[in-house]
Image (tube, coloured by chain):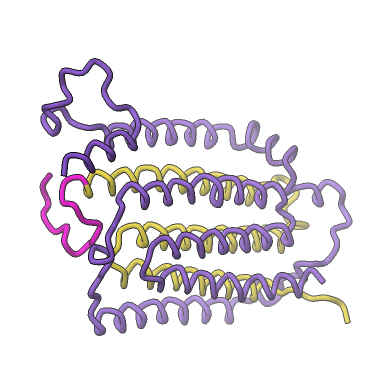
Chain colours: A purple, B yellow
Amino acid sequence: MDSSVFHICGLLSVAAAALVVTRRNPVYSTIYLVLFFTLISLEFLILRAPFLAIVQVLVYAGAIMVLFLFVIMLLNLTPEELREDVSRSRKVLSGAFAALIFVLLAAAIRRSDTVRDAPNLVAPIEDPGLAKAGEAPAIGTALFTTHALAFEFSSILILVAIVGAIHLTKRRGRAAPSGQGAPAQGTGEQVQAAAEASGT
Amino acid sequence: MIPHLSLSFCLYVSAALFAIGVYGVLSRQNLIVILMSLELMLNAVNLSTIAFGRAFLPASPPDPSGPQVFVVMVLAVAAAEAAVGLSILLAVFRKWRTTHAGRIDMLKG
């Protein structure tokens, strides 16, 4: 049961990924990306990583996808702006390069003794401690004991990302001379986008 | 017949997803889709990490949650990357009125 679900999810996720990179309209790409993340989450569930399956749906399908959709809505692109005019030779070359990477990886997987001798991934786990290795208590304990340093560094990384995102999207003073006198500058991106739309 | 799921199938799926992500980054010109292709590649790597962790779970007594913690870190990096990447995209769009990667060829703001 588990293995057949995984095989179906694996093939579907490859199909969803192919649809993501081939759709012309980024909104469709985003929708297929949500499907892709959900399928990856199911695969995590079968590989005994229930915590990561939940986090995958929350962070990727929930937060990152909403961010992408917000940006697409803010940009408000017209069909002319979405035209890419990618030359055929460029598509063929990038396809060939991607195929080369896949062939190299597949050759490495095929020849590896470690992979060939690996046990069945859906076999039951006898040791109760190991069976719970993918659940929230075990991951939380590992994060705050063994990997505490990496955890603290990731918090610094996210802080830098927040500050960087605010700095990059903040409207500069000289870019909008008319809005300088107002005490309350537009805080949200929507306000700025609305101002831009009314200005042009 | 005992249900069987081999590690190599997971790795083949992961390699295919990574290759599709590479194709997206190389062939597309829309910056939003390029960022999405980066997410595809990160997920491919996560999938192979989890598959390896599951396969060699009985052989890893000191730190059985190690692969999962690694994937959590990758998730944090991916979230930071998406936030910064999309805000760069917004700044670029404000300056040049385009998200076409081929038209952003000046190394100055």
Which of B78/A197 is in front?
A197
Q: Which residues are magenta?
A: B94-109
Q: Looking at this view, is A134 or A68 the one in front?
A: A68
| Nearer to me, A26 or A108 | A26
Q: Residue at x 58, y 75 (%)?
A: B12
Identity of the residue drawn at 67% across and 58% down: A44
Q: Is residue A66 magenta?
A: no
Which quarter of the rendered picture does the N terminus of chain B lie within?
bottom right
Q: How many marks?
A: 0
Let me know if residue B108 is in the magenta part: yes
Q: Would you say the magenta stretch is mainly helix, strand or loop?
A: loop
Quadrant of res A196? top left
Q: Is residue A166 left or right of residue A8?
A: left
Q: Is residue A169 left or right of residue A159?
A: left
Q: Residue at x 38, y 73 (%)?
A: B23
Q: Is residue A131 left or right of residue A82?
A: right
In the foreground, A47 or B34: B34
Residue sitting at the far front: A198
Residue A194: which quarter of the image?
A: top left
In this image, A157 relative to B98: left or right?
Answer: right
The location of residue A43, given as percent across then percent down, is 67, 63
Q: Is residue A31 above or below residue B65?
A: below
Residue A18 screen position, x and y as percent:
47, 74
* Quadrant housing the C terminus of chain B: top left
Residue A93 screen position, x and y as percent = 29, 81
- What residue is rendered at 87% in x and 77% in y? B2
Across and down, in percent, residue A24 comes to 36, 70
